[in-house]
């Protein structure tokens, strides 16, 4: 794990991190225990926050003076599945080709975690005047779920980090905003019948399709008249139906159908108001069936996280821009835990990390060596500031 200079190398650390197959549906404890041991060997104590089954955990650690607010480096340890993807090399083994480091999670976001761990190692050998904090979470990829137990605990702390950097891949540009997300499940109910006489039943798939049409109408209205933020590639709030399940066999009018849909809202849009409109649309769809005793739509919230909106002149923006040499802030369409740190804890937060989001979730995911080197340089500059 050590380079010729005796330091922990971010590339070697990334090799180790990629080797842990921390898909969200599986445990991340081997990775967390590895990190805890690595920190402990440098005199850094880490706190763990387990899930109810004790198969996953968040990790939090601090280096430097205990009675001072510092800078938090935050990353998620889980990765998306490789199911159905064709890779040119083993996904959970780091492979280098032409300056690119391939493996699941290299860009999203174990590359940043590797650089953060290297920074913690270096920080343990310095006298910091301002502390450096590290937070690693689980289940970010399934709705920013795992970090919430850590955030709930942090809410009661007398001393919290003042600034936070969430290291999602931005090519080391400073992202000051991302959209919020609300995920929902629509359970559509009808009445089963033989398909030879479908009028005797109420087709739940047809009800679901009518709801999809209502979602598309609502999306068109939002795009035409809703709040817009030109800093985003898609400047308005979006509604999207991503999953549909229904029916059993072709000759039965289906009595059940489920949809999963999401809202990705700009900060100026109120997702609760959009959900209320969806509920009203669902009521209309059911009424239009003329079979109120048999038809129904139940909208169930699955998960949500808030949008991030950090002022361009905020201290954290100026700091990270100086560290990276990237003065122009951006906004990103994907979500992150940054909105939670900002909204729930009042910590001024930006998203900034190595690699490209274009590589995330794809087969043959990679991060360029040059991006890791630039992230290491950012961390080195941060340590100079904290010292």
Image (cartoon, rainbow, N blue to C red):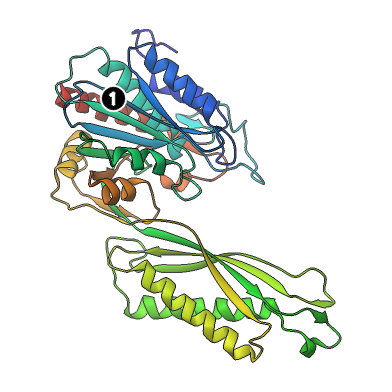
Q: Is 127 located above or below residue 380 in the figure?
A: above
- State the image coordinates of residue 285 (x, y, percent, origin top left): 57, 84
Q: Secondary structure at mark 1?
A: strand
Q: Image quarter for residue 356?
A: top left
Viewer-proximal residue among 283 and 382:
283
* Residue assigned mark 1: 62
Q: Is residue 114 left or right of residue 374?
A: right
Viewer-proximal residue among 8 and 201:
201
- From the image, which quarter does the N terminus lie in? top left
Q: Is residue 233 left or right of residue 37?
A: left
- From the image, which quarter does the C terminus lie in? top left
Q: Is 134 located above or below residue 142 in the figure?
A: above
Residue lying at 13% horizontally and 50% vertically, measured from the top left: 313
Q: Is 42 located above or below residue 380 in the figure?
A: above
- State the image coordinates of residue 219 (x, y, percent, origin top left): 44, 75
Residue lying at 26% horizontally and 52% vertically, measured from the top left: 330
Viewer-proximal residue among 107 and 50:
50
Viewer-proximal residue among 108 and 248:
248
Q: Is residue 278 left or right of residue 364?
A: left
- State the image coordinates of residue 212 (x, y, percent, origin top left): 56, 76
- State the image coordinates of residue 276 (x, y, percent, origin top left): 42, 75
Residue 327: tell me if it is visible. Answer: yes
Residue 95: tell me if it is visible. Answer: no
Q: Image quarter for residue 70?
A: top left
- For the image shown, how many numbered marks are present on the structure? 1
For the residue carrying disc 1, how many other residues have a C-alpha within 10 Å: few (<14), some (14-19), or many (20+)?
A: many
């Amino acid at each position: 794990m050590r380079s010729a200079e005796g330091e922990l190398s971010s590339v070697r650390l990334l090799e180790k991190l990629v080797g842990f197959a921390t898909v969200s549906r599986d445990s991340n404890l081997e990775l967390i225990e590895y990190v805890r041991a690595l920190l402990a060997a440098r005199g850094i104590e880490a706190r763990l926050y387990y899930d109810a089954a004790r198969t996953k955990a968040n990790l939090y650690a601090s280096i430097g003076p205990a009675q001072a607010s510092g800078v938090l480096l935050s990353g998620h340890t889980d990765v998306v599945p490789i199911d159905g993807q064709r890779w040119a090399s083993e996904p959970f083994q780091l492979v280098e080709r032409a300056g690119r480091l391939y493996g699941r999670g290299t860009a999203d976001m174990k590359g940043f975690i590797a650089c953060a761990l290297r920074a913690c190692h270096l920080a343990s050998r310095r006298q910091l005047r301002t502390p450096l904090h590290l937070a690693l979470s689980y289940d970010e990829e399934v709705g920013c779920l795992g970090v919430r137990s850590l955030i709930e605990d942090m809410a009661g702390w007398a001393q919290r980090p003042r600034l936070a950097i969430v290291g999602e891949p931005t090519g080391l540009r400073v992202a000051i905003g991302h959209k919020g997300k609300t995920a929902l499940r629509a359970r559509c109910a009808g009445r089963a019948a033989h398909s030879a006489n479908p009028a005797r039943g109420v087709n739940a798939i047809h009800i679901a399709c009518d709801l999809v049409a209502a979602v598309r109408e609502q999306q068109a209205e939002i795009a035409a008249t809703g709040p817009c933020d030109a800093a985003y590639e898609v400047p308005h709030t979006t509604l999207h139906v991503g999953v549909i399940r229904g029916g059993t066999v072709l000759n039965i009018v289906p009595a059940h159908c489920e949809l999963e849909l999401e809202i990705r809202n700009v900060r100026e849009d109120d997702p609760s108001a959009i959900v209320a409109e969806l509920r009203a649309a669902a009521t209309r769809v059911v009424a239009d069936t003329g079979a109120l005793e048999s038809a129904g739509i139940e909208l169930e919230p699955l998960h949500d996280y808030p949008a991030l909106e950090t002022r361009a002149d905020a201290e954290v923006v100026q700091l990270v821009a100086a560290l990276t040499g990237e003065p122009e802030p951006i906004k990103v369409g994907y979500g992150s835990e940054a909105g939670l740190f900002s909204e729930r804890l009042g910590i001024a937060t930006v998203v900034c990390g190595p690699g490209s989001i274009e590589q995330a979730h794809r087969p043959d995911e990679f991060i360029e060596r040059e991006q890791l080197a630039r992230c290491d340089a950012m961390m080195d500059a941060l340590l100079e500031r904290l010292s």
